[in-house]
Image (tube, rainbow, N blue to C red):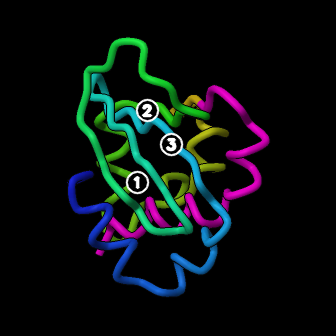
């Protein structure tokens, strides 16, 4: 599913616009599987599947496979619909440079929700 992230985000000009100043690589962890997502000017340049040894990233969003499965349902159940809801439930961990994550929070929320379609 994560492999389709670039296609979904890059094909939606509204999402790209929200990330137009973002030039970062972040980690998205689905259970034990790691993905490095590289964003340049709001476009997802590449999604690489791990595991990784000593690769750099600015921040990480980590959750179990069951959590992401609930989040990516269409429509998601109440309490599973948003990163903040997952954080409140204790289902997701946010690590790394939080300033970058919060600066592009809406872009990240829209990008991750794009996998629901």
Specify the segment rendered in magenta: 94-117
Secondary structure at badge 1 equals helix
Frontmost of labels 2 and 3 is 3
Q: Nearer the viewer, residue 5 or 77?
A: 5
Which residue appears at 67% of the width and 57% of the height?
A: 105
Residues at badges 3 and 1 in contact (C-beta under 8 Å)?
Answer: no
Secondary structure at badge 2 equals strand
Please tell me in which quadrant of the rendered image residue 87 appears: top right
- In percent of width and height, residue 36 lies at 38, 38
Residue 115 among those drawn in magenta: yes
Horizontally, residue 25 falls left or right of residue 6, namely right
Q: How far apart are marks 2 and 1 (CA)?
A: 10 Å
Q: Which of marks 3 and 1 is nearer the N terminus?
A: 3
Q: Which of marks 2 and 3 is nearer the N terminus?
A: 3
- In percent of width and height, residue 85 lies at 61, 49
- In percent of width and height, residue 29 lies at 38, 32
The residue to which callout 1 is attached is: 71
Please tell me in which quadrant of the rendered image residue 66 appears: top left
Say if 105 sits above or below 28 in the image. Answer: below
Residues at badges 2 and 1 in contact (C-beta under 8 Å)?
Answer: yes
The residue to which callout 3 is attached is: 25
The residue to which callout 2 is attached is: 63
User: Extreme bottom residue here?
Assistant: 13
- Which SS type dominates the magenta stretch? helix
């Amino acid at each position: 599913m994560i492999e389709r992230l670039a296609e979904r985000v890059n094909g939606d000009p509204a999402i790209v616009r929200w990330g137009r100043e973002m030039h970062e690589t972040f980690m998205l962890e689905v259970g034990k599987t790691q993905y490095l997502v590289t964003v340049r000017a709001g476009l997802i340049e590449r999604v690489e599947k791990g595991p990784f040894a000593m690769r750099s990233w600015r921040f990480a969003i980590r959750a179990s496979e069951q959590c992401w499965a609930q989040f990516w349902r269409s429509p998601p159940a109440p309490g599973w619909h948003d990163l903040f809801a997952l954080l409140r439930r204790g289902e997701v961990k946010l690590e790394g440079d939080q300033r970058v994550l919060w600066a592009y929070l809406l872009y990240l929320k829209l990008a991750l929700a794009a996998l629901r379609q």
